[in-house]
Amino acid sequence: MGPDGFGPSGGDGGFGGGAGAAGPAGGHAVPVRSGGSPDGALVFGGEGERPGFELGTFEDDGGEDEIAERSGSAAAGAAGRPGANRAGNGSAAANAPMAMAAADSGSDAAGASWFAGSGTAGVPGVSAPGTPGGSGTAAETTPAPPADAGPPGAASGPAPNPAADQPPIGPGLAGSAVTAARSLFGPQTVVEAVQVLAEHPDAVIIAGGTVAMPDITAGRRHPGTVLTLHRCAELRGWSTGSGEVLLHAGLTLAEMQQRDLRQQVPALNQAVRTVGAPHIRAVATLGGNLVVGPASADLPVVLAALGASVLVASADGVRTVTVSDFYDRDGVPQIAPGELVVGARVPVVEGMQGFMKIGVRGGISRAILSIMLAVDPARRSATCVVGAMALAGLPSGTGRGGLPTLLRADHADRWLAEQVDWDAAAIADPTVYETFGRLVADSLVYGDGSGTLGGGGDPYRRKAVEICARRALLRALPPLGWLDQVRELQKRADFQRAKQRVERAEVERAEQARNQDQ
Amino acid sequence: MSESAVEWPAVGLTLRVDGHEYPVPQVWIGDSLLAVLRERLDLDEPRDGCSIGECGSCLVTLDGRPAAACLVPAVAAADRDVRTPQDAAFEAAREAVVAANASPCGFCAPALTVAITDLLRRNADPGPAAIREALAGLVCRCAESGRWIEAVARAKEAGVGDGGTRGPAGGDSGEMAVLVIEAGETES
């Protein structure tokens, strides 16, 4: 048993030794920019200078070689898997001896640390959670991914299936038979994770556990296969690109509150503070929040207003979809079996961002209304997104009607953009605020008026949306000259305070003088 | 999962709890850490309140960060450092909770010690607002929050959180995003 105490099958961490026990992450990067040059590519878990894959090429040759090499070099730790080792070595030799040789040099050290089961050492991109990028290791750079990378979408053949040759039952503790081999996967890379998902589309994916575990504990879900993502270093943290940040799916809500990220995307911190207790935020992840969808999550509202897009990986590659398109109009995330949300790309904009939420109680709770207003002075636009706003009484044919979803107030945004004095980042006409609130509330009425989506039919929510939109706008784009007035008032207040300080000092001096006289 | 019978796939693992190693021969892959701690290891300080992560009674720390044990799969806790409220690290906070009578019925007292210790490690001098925000995840309420604030003050005096710098990723510091306006020159 490895030092991590993971399970029966030798040093592979007890995660069954299936596809999930494939090699370490060396060189496997999930591409996030289709067709881009490697220079500009944002690469999961690595620094900018690391060569990036082209889209759709990460799953085949290199992966197989890596798997083969690792299982071969650590055959002692992978007891009970001779079939897998043989198959892996054979294919490696047949396919790409060059790559295998390249992988050879770094594999011993990496293999040792990987099979030691620490789950972190030697894996590229591992760093303190939240630290963007990671210091490279020798193993990280050796397997030369661009040599194997083909053009986007040119990947051929099914995903490798190293688990096929494996005995399903391994010896457990005290000689008991444990059927772990096909049930539990703890992949360390996104590549392995999507391979597992391709083989087990029904696997329950657990990252933070805040979504899946209540269902499992209550018996609503009975997992036959569990895929935990807590060892997947590539999914942790976030990285910075040009004009955007890439939030990896494993970024926890607590990590979103750190200063570096807060400065670039302040609304994330505002939203996260309303989401849960510290112990929930410490484990809940961006990916889980996105997959739960706007029915109970707040981050989709923020990300939709910022114009972010979601990266969804599968065995076929990575697709990018905007947050607005990621959910259908009933708020159901459009994600197929076998797909895994691996991150979100968020553009960094300069303007004010405001998030507001009304919950069922004063403390942290689920939203009955959340609203996000993002102002982009460079593009002279403002975007308002309202979340958690669906009601029952939808027109038929909408599937799961009545679930909260995201609603954009596009025409209110467009109207607003014409009213703003963009050079001063202010609004001259004070009636704009109330009109904007009313327009946002009006825009939530759906269709011909017979059915309502959002707050159109709910007087409380309609009123709340109106007020929240007005206040959000007031904070984001103050009235013209308002900042000058505030500055003036503050100057006057400072003057008063200084004056009082001087007077107090004079009084004290006078008293001291009197005391000394006596 | 086969169609004919419900399978309960299990793994063997070793949990590292409070610095001790506990081998657990067979754990269902869907078992929560809380279930294993309470039912298998007989460590009953993390309470089983709601089992859905709402009440915070099952608070433990995982690798130094607070987590609701009912939301952590046991298999995901195997290679990590689990600390239950029984751990010596929470001794001072426990005494503070008792001294302030912050948990009259005692059900949430263990979780409260973990939450207070975590708060003081993150924020050495929290104000009342930061305390309320940090403890908002514990919904046990047979004590009014004034006693909880007193417990935090006593724990601070006892030196909880001293030297516990955890870096900026620790979470909320009670800061609000506010519009800062430069006052300019004052004429005094």
Image: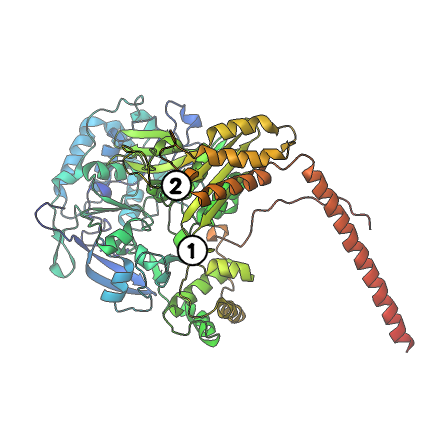
Check disc 2 and give the amino acid type: Gly
Q: Nearer the viewer, residue A53 or A259?
A: A259
| Above/below status of A66 relative to A77 | above
Of the 4 image quadrants, the one containing the N terminus of chain A is bottom left
Check disc 1 and give the amino acid type: Ala
Q: Nearer the viewer, residue A468 or B117?
A: A468
* Image spot of residue A188 (x, y percent): 30, 43
* Tag 2 subunit: A
Q: Earlier in the sequence, mark 2 or mark 1?
A: 2
What separation in Å lies between label 2 and label 1 (alpha carbons)?
Answer: 28 Å
Q: Nearer the viewer, residue A464 or A323?
A: A464
Q: Nearer the viewer, residue A153 or A173?
A: A153
Q: Which residue is mark 1?
A: A277
* Image spot of residue A177 (x, y percent): 11, 55
Is A335 placed left or right of A201 in the picture?
right
* Image spot of residue A82 (x, y percent): 13, 42
Is A197 placed left or right of A443 in the picture?
left
| Above/below status of B142 relative to A409 | below
Residue A255 marker: none
* Location of residue A110 (image quadrant): top left
Residue at the right extreme? Answer: A517
* Tag 1 subunit: A
Mark 2 crowd level (few <14, some 14–19, many ≥20, 10 Å Cα)? many
